[in-house]
Structure formats: structure tokens, C-alpha cells
Amino acid sequence: MNCFCEACEVTQRDLYVGLYESLITEELRTALEPYDENLTAIEGVDEADQPHVLARHVQAIVQRVLESTKDGAERVTIVNDLIRSIHQPPAAVVAPTRQLLRLSEIAKPGAVGGVDVRPRTPLSDAALLTNTKDEPSLGAELRAELETAHDVDLLCAFVKWHGIRLLENELGRLKLRRVPFRIITTTYMGATERGALDRLVREFGAEVKVQYDAQRTRLHAKAWMFRRDTGFDTAYVGSSNLSRAALLDGVEWNVRLSGMGTPSLLEKFRATFDTYWNDASFETYDPDADRDRLDDALAEASGRTQHDRVTISLSGLEVRSFPYQQDMLDAIAVERVVHGHHRNLVVAATGTGKTVIAALDYRRLCEPSSGDQPSLLFVAHRRRSSTSLCERTARSSLIRISASCMSAAHVPTVGAMSSPVCSRCTRTGSPTFGAMPMTSSSWMNSTTPRQPRTVTCSVTSNPASSLD
């Protein structure tokens, strides 16, 4: 992307359709000659603003020249010469002092025409918006920004239906102009409304990513980024969520950043947003596939339901892995498929979810079409560990667990955890070991219990006994 500040040499091939605040220099005037005057919007600069506008122009030129000079003494010489006589013909200002504010696209059949609007805050300035009287509200500025941007990013903790309604006309035209629109949000506090995200995706063509694990990452940021091909990018960072009150009359503070006035801040904004966007913990939201999961996550985050973890512990929901667990699963799959290695060892720290990894890997090995379900064996070196394993796994509904009697000669019947019965001696006992294949991926939605399978009981009374 090219920068079109006053310090840049502008040629005809460099001009983009869009908003500007560029002083009319000799070079720019020459570049504009081929364009019809009806396509350009040129206005005089107010006398009160001329010192600031002209100083910014000179500052950009001086900075560019000094950055291209490596010798310190030569830089001092340049500055001293500049004090005596400031002159650089291609960047000389054409009197009277004026700025290029817009370059419009030539009308074409079927093209979506631009709206003659611009933010009240100059594109080159930073500002503080507080929604107070006699200054533009954040909502009004966002509407103008959306009409003139070529790329939009939104990082917002809470997305509300009524907030979208305030911007729906502009968002509709944004989609017609095929402007990319990326949104990152979260389930934090359960404040986001699923209907709002559904509408953003379906009606306005936005690409949405959601951070579901609000307990680990409490995203609370609110920020907009508006990129323009002309180089006059802008951004808003502050307290306003995408809600009606926040955009109109709420007591909100938001800082407006400028690619011309605060370029380093916009670069950091862009880099940080892209980091979040490419983080596996922020997952693409599909209204058709993910609506139930999002509803449950929002309900849990708001306190309406209580669960340990929405994507793992709730019976009836799809079991999902953490990103680091998925990396392990992918590595195992590569060893099997690519290298033909079918005896693989996973070593992970306590609490990282090795049981869940094993269950998800096993489910992947099952063949739903053929019903092929290989045997699964859990080995624990202590009875307390195996008992805890059975209880946790049963609560998670990942695998149906058998109960074993206390004799190696006995064969337990696989059944529910509440009534373990040995098929040979009909004795009941505490569940200490389970061995049973998981069902296919349809087990999550099935209401018909699977028929238990009988396995050989190989747990003796010795807590540290080996399992065959």
C-alpha cells in the first residue's frame, strides 16, 4: 500500500479512488490533470488551520530527508540550511493553500456508487470522542468510516443486536462494495448476542471468530480499524462495545488514531489483531454449525448454567480439544498415515488432558460405516488413579466404563457405573478399571444405549498389578 502524505511524490499511476487530505503540490496538481474536475473534491484550508496543515507538510518532508541521510554531521547541515531557506520544488505548495479531499471512481454500469460523506474528525488527526454535546458521537463517525473504508477490522467483547441496527445501512453497502470485514469477539460474561453474530455473517458477509474459553482469556477490548487504499487509515480504541448506548449517548471514551498522525500505533493495532486472528483459540463462527455451541457457551459464561467446561464436560455436546491437544492429535495422525507408525507414545504434563486426548484419538479410529471399533485399554499403576479415571470419564460420557471384580479369574460385564456386576460371580464392586471401545462419532446424539461388551477381568487385589 502506498502512502500519500504531503511528503510523498505522487504520480498519476499512484492515485487511488478514496479519501485524502493532501496538500495540492505541484506534483499532485500535475497528476490530477487527466481527471475530470467533477471527480475531484478540492477545498481551501481554513486560515486558522493553515499553520498546523503547512507545518505537518514540512515536518513530513524534513523527516523523510533526514531518514535517508545516514551521516550525523550532514543531517545537522541539512537542518541549518533548511532554517536559512526551505525549498523543495516538487513539494512546493501551490497558492492558495488547498487540500485534495476525495478522488471518485468513474461511474460504471452495475458499480456501487460511493456516498459523499466523511468523518468529522480529520483523517490525519488523533482525537478523543466522549459522546458529549456539540461533538460527533462514535456512532456517527463509525457510519462515515464504514462508507469510505476499503478494509474493516473489529475487535469487540460484546456484540449486540441493537448496535448492529444503528449501522445496518452502512454495513449493507459495505457488503455490496465487497469490502472485507473481520470480527473477533468472545463469550466473556455471556453478553454477546448470538442473533447479532448470525446477522453479521449471513446478511453482511462478515467473517467472525469467537473465543469460547472465557475462563482462560477474558477478552474485553473494543477497537475498530479502517484501512484505505489512499493510505489514510484510521482506528478507534476505547470503551464502547457494539451496542446502542455505547455508540450514541453512553458515557464512553474512545481515542481516534490516524495513520498519518499516529502511524506506529496503527501498525501495532494491525499486528496484534492479526496475531489474534491467526490464534487457534479464536475459532471461525458458522451460524449453521456452531449456534448451539455458542448458546451453551454464552449461557455458561453468564451464569445461567454451571459446568466445568462447555466443550468437554457436557453430555450431548461435541467434544473439542484445546489447540495444544489438537497439535498432539495431528502429530499422531501424521505418524500413522504418513510414516506407517502405529505404536506411538504421548508424554504430557499432569493436567494437560491426556485422557481426553486418548478418547478423541480413539473416536477417530472408529469406523462409523462398518461399525469397526477396536478394543481400548486404560492402564493405571494405582487403584486410586484408575478409580478416578473411571469416574471422570463416566461424568464426561466419553467412554462407557466396565467395573471389575477383585479376582483375576472373574469376567466383569460392561455396564453402567452405578451397578457393576461380575458375569461369573455376580458380585458387585467398586469400579477400578474399564476397557470398552467408544462409539462412533454419532454417540453424542444417540439416545439408545449401546449394548455392553464383556471383557476379561484382569485386575487383582494388588493395587500395583499389571494389566494384560
Image: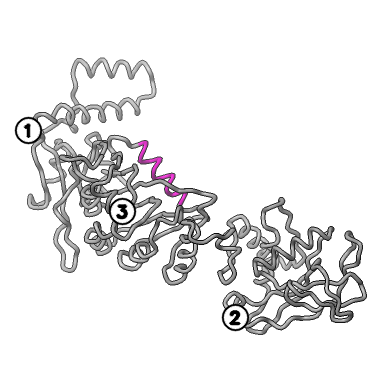
Pointer 3: residues within 10 angstroms few (<14), some, or many (20+)?
many
User: Which quadrant would residue 190 be assigned to in this image?
Assistant: bottom left
Disc 2 target residue: 447
Q: On screen, 45 above or below 170?
A: above
Residue 421 placement, left or right of 286: right
Disc 3 target residue: 243
Tell me the amino acid under the disc marked 1.
Pro
Along the viewing direction, whichever of 447 and 277 lies nearer the viewer: 447
Q: Mainly helix, strand or loop, the magenta region?
A: helix
Callout in the foreground (1, 2): 2
Q: Which residues are magenta?
A: 264-276
Label 2 element class: loop
- How far apart are labels 1 and 3 at the CA level? 44 Å
Q: Does the magenta segment cover residue 98?
A: no
Disc 1 target residue: 96
Callout in the foreground (1, 3): 3
Q: Which residue is pictured at 86% across the width and 76% down the height?
A: 427
Where's residue 228, x and y in %? 27, 49
Tell me the amino acid under the disc marked 2.
Thr
- How far apart are labels 1 and 2 at the CA level? 80 Å
Where's residue 98, x and y in %? 11, 36
Q: On screen, 409 above or below 332?
A: below
Pointer 1 and pointer 2: residues touching (CB < 8 Å)? no
- How far apart are labels 3 and 2 at the CA level? 41 Å
Label 3 element class: loop
Q: Which residue is pictured at 79% across the width and 58% down the height?
A: 385
Tell me the amino acid under the disc marked 3.
Ser
Q: Which residue is pictured at 67% across the width and 62% down the height?
A: 357
Reading the chain from its start, which is encountered first: label 3 or label 2?
3
User: Which quadrant would residue 234 be assigned to in this image?
Assistant: top left
